[in-house]
Image (tube, rainbow, N blue to C red):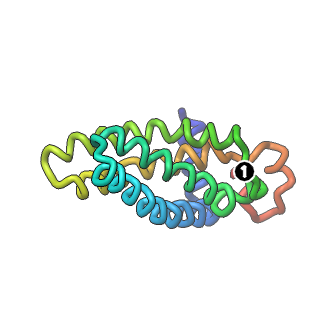
Amino acid sequence: MQAFARQIIDAWNRRSFLAKLFSFASIGVVNVLVDVSAFTFFVQVVHLQLIPSNILAWIVAVTGSYMMNSKITFGHETGGLLSVGRYLRFAASGILGVVIATTVLVVLSRYTTIPIAKLASIASAFSMNFCMSHFFVFRAQPAARARAPLGTDRAG
């Protein structure tokens, strides 16, 4: 656990981490629009209940997020290439995020409007999703870190 905490502190102090965080957040903004649009479609047009609508919207959004993050945010680690295995790891790592988001959505929808509950659910999952992506899904392989030029992010 201490080693993981040191990795987080180490990465936080690197400018590349902040650039990745900004890129991930920017892609997240696009995906919020995708997620909310898909969610609204499933609730208002297809007339699905909240949980299936949220899960289907998440599947649509996670696919777009994986593609953009593979090409942009973590392009150095992926070589800009898409991979079924990495997609599955990305989607699997997002399961915790969708569980958190769905729980927040259902609980808050009892106390506030559904759009506010939906936005809160998205925000609650953001930190978990970024950490999983940065430290586990798109982590650079040791050989790639060794080849990275001096002064660049070798931790991926």
Pick out the residue farthest to the front.
46
All told, the count of numbered labels is: 1
- Which of the 4 image quarters holds residue 132? top right
Local packing at callout 1 (Cα closer than 10 Å; few below 14, some 14-19, many 20+) is: some
- Determine whether the residue tagged by mark 1 lies in a helix, strand or loop: loop
Quadrant of the image for the N terminus?
top right
Tell me what residue is drawn at x 66 percent, y 63 percent.
Answer: 72
Residue 96 lies, in percent from the top left, at 45, 36
Residue 78 lies, in percent from the top left, at 74, 52
Q: Amino acid at mark 1?
A: Leu
- Which of the 4 image quarters holds residue 20? bottom right
- Viewed as shown, does residue 29 lie left or right of 90? left
- Which of the 4 image quarters holds residue 92? top right
Pick out the residue farthest to the left.
111
Pick out the residue farthest to the top.
1
Relative height, residue 10 to residue 100 (above, below): below
Residue 39 lies, in percent from the top left, at 36, 52
Q: Looking at this view, is 59 or 48 the one in front?
A: 48
Relative height, residue 132 to residue 126 (above, below): above
Tell me what residue is drawn at x 33 percent, y 56 percent.
Answer: 40
Residue 88 lies, in percent from the top left, at 62, 38
Tell me what residue is drawn at x 42 percent, y 49 percent.
Answer: 57
Residue assigned mark 1? 82
- Viewed as shown, does residue 104 lie left or right of 129? left
Tell me what residue is drawn at x 50 percent, y 41 percent.
Answer: 94
Relative height, residue 49 to residue 118 (above, below): above
